[in-house]
Amino acid sequence: MRAQDIETLVSVGRPALSSDGSFVVYATSRPDVAADRSVGQLWRVDLPDGSPRRITRGIADRSPRLSPDDATIAFLRADGRGRAQIFVAPAAGGEPVQVTDQPGGVTDLSWSPDGSRLAFTARMVEPGRYGTVEGRDAAAEPPRRITGIRWRANGHGYLDRPAHLFVVEAPAADAEPFYEPAPDLLTPEKQVVPSVPHQLTEGATSWSGVAWTADGRELLSVPDVIEDRTRDLRSRVVAVSVEGAGSREVLGTSANLSIDEVAVAPDGAIFLRGNYVGPSGVDFVAPGTALWLLEAAGPRALTDPETIDLGEVGSHLSFVGDDVLVQDRTRGRVRLLRVSRGREMREVIGGDLEVSGHAAVDGRVVASVALPTSFGELVLHEGGTTRTVTEHGRAAGERGIVVPEEREIAGRDGYPVHGWVAVPDGEGPFPVILQIHGGPYASYGVHLFDETQVLVDAGYAVVYSNPRGSAGYGRAHGRSIRQAMGTLDYFDVIDFFDGVVGSDPRLDAERVGIQGGSYGGYMTAWIIAHDHRFAGAIVERGFLDPVAFPGASDIGSFFGQEYVGTDPERIAAQSPMAVVDRVRTSTLVLHSELDYRCPLEQATRYYAALRHNGVDAEMLVFPGEDHELTRAGRPRHRVQRFEAVVDWWARHLPVA
C-alpha cells in the first residue's frame, strides 16, 4: 500500500436495522485526495441475500437512523456552509428533505418512539462569532472571558459553543420541498426548513446524548458543567421533559460514574455504559468501562470491568429482546457479546476482527467490522454463522496487503507481551522499524492499518506490541504503569522487539528505527534517551513535557496528575524532557498546529532542546490539523505526512 492508497480505506459506520430485520442501512466514509476531504454516502442491503446499493449522493452523509415504522431514514449531511444538519429520506432511497438549519451544526439525533418527532443536540453559537456576521473573521471577534479550568477541546476548539437539546416535528420524506425565499424577502422570521425546532435546554452547560424514554415524554442526557477549580469526571444523567415540564435527575454524581452512553431498552429499562472514577472524580487510568442497569437502588454492573473492556472508541449499546449487545476489546480484537440482565454472557461475533457497530432483531445481527484485509465491511450473523455481505475492502486488497504475524514474547520478568510483526515479501534481512501506539490505554489491533502497510511497502519490517499500560488485557495490565511511566511499559516494548528480531532471520537487528505517536511519541522519546542503537526516530504528537502539560492540554487538568503524579521528583523520573540531553539519535518531530491534546508547545520545546544539544533533528508542522491527523486529517496532509515518513527512513535507514 502506497501513501495515495489511503483512498481505498473505506470505513463502515454503525448500521441501522429495520424492525423486521429485512434490510439494513449504513454509511461509508473514505479519504478522497482530489477533494481533500472524507467522502461517503448511505447504503442499503436487503437481507439476507441482497447486494449493497448506494441510496444517497451527498458528499459525506452519515449517522443513519431508521424511523420506528422503517419508512424513513434520518441522517446528518453538511449544508452549504459545512454545518451538519438533519435530513430525512425514504428508506428505499430518494431526494432528502432538510429538517434543521442550526448555525452551530447538529451533533446527535434520535427518533421519538412514535416516529412523529426527532430529538437532537446542536451547538449554540454566540452572535458575532464563528461566521455569524458576514465579513467578520475569527481575528475580529471580541475577546473570550475564561473562568473555568477547561476552555478548549481537541478537534473542537473553544468551549463556548455548548450543545443543547432540541425537538422538531419530523417532516414527511415525500413532502414537497421547502423553497427558500428570494434574497430581497429574506428576514430573520423566514426559515430554510419546514419546521421550527423547540429548544429544551439553555445556558453554558453542554448536553450529550438524546435517548427517549419509552413513553416519549422525556429525553435522557448527560450535562457537562465546566468546573471552577478541580476536574470532576463524574457524570449526572438528567431526564428533560420534551413538553417543557422541567427536568429531573436520574443519576447523580454520588454514583461516582463517568457515563459514555445512556440507552433505553424497548421495555423502558435504562442502561448505561461508563466507568467508575471514585469519589475523587478523576480515577480514570485504565477506566473499567462496563455495562450498568439503572435500578431503583442505583446502577448495577452487568459486566466485570476488571476483565471485560467496553471502552473502545465508537462503542455503543444495542438491544435484542431483554439482552444487550456490547463490544469487548480483547487482545487486539473487538468482539460482540450478548449480555443478559442476570449477567449471563456469550460471544455473538468474534475471531480476527474488530466490531465497530451493530444492530439486532430476533436472531439476526448485523455488524460493521474491520478485518486484517479490509478497513470496513458489513457482516450478517444468523443461525450460528457469520458472513460478510459487502466488498468495500476489495480496492485496498488489490493494492497489496501484508497480513501481520502474531507473536507473544516473555519479557525480562516473565510477563507475556503480545504483538505482531509485518514483513515484506522475500527472505530479507529487512531493516526493522519499532512502532509504538498512543494512549497509553489503547491498543494495536488486527484491522488493516495503513501506518504499517505503507512502511512494509517501502521495504521495512514493522514490529509492534501492546505493552503494559495498553487496553484489552484486563484492567490490571492497564493500570500497572500509573505514576510509573517509562518502566514496565519500556521493558515490554524493548523485550518484545528484541525477542521478535532475535528469533526471525528475515529481520536485520543491525538496521533498526523507532517511531510512535501521542503516548507512542512519549515512549519513542523516552527510549532514544536510554537506548542509542536506532538509526533514526520519529516522535509524533508526543506527550513530552509533563510539567507544561497541565496548563496547555485539553485534558491537562487531570491526565498528567493521574499518570505521572504531582511530586516534582517523580514527574522528572518519567519525563522525556528531563532526559532530552541524553538523546543521540537523529529525530524527526511531527506535530499539528491545532493539536490541543498534546499541544504544539510539547513539540517545539523538545525540538529546540534537541537542536541546542547538537542532535540531528528536523520538525514538520501541519497547519490546520489537530491530534487526529493520521486518522482523520485532510487526505493531502495524510499523504504528505506519509511521504515525509518514508523520506526520513530512506535517508536514515535506507533499504538495501
Image (spheres, rainbow, N blue to C red):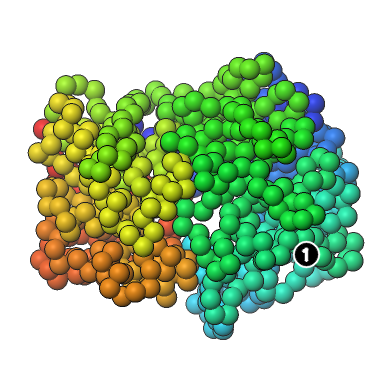
Which quadrant is home to the N terminus? top left
Which quadrant is home to the C terminus? top left
* Residue at numbered disc 1: 249
Measured as percent of width and height from the top left, residue 281 is found at 56, 66
Q: Is residue 179 above or below residue 132?
A: above
Q: Quadrant of residue 225?
A: bottom right
Q: Quadrant of residue 461?
A: top left
- Residue at 46% in and 27% down: 352
Q: Is residue 140 above or below residue 376?
A: below
Please indicate whether residue 494 sits to the left or right of residue 560 in the image.
left
Q: Is residue 116 above or below residue 358?
A: below
- Residue at 22% in and 69% down: 578
Number of numbered discs overlaid on the protein picture: 1
The amino acid sitting under disc 1 is Glu
Q: Is residue 245 above or below residue 16?
A: below
Measured as percent of width and height from the top left, residue 652 is found at 13, 47
Q: Tag 1: Cα neighbours inside 10 Å, few (<14), some, or many (≥20)?
A: few
The answer to whether any part of residue 134 appears in the image is: no
Please indicate whether residue 390 sits to the left or right of residue 116 in the image.
left
The answer to whether any part of residue 332 appears in the image is: yes
Measured as percent of width and height from the top left, residue 240 is found at 81, 62
- Residue at 51% in and 42% down: 307
- Residue at 54% in and 32% down: 335
Measured as percent of width and height from the top left, residue 505 is found at 15, 26
Secondary element at image label 1: strand
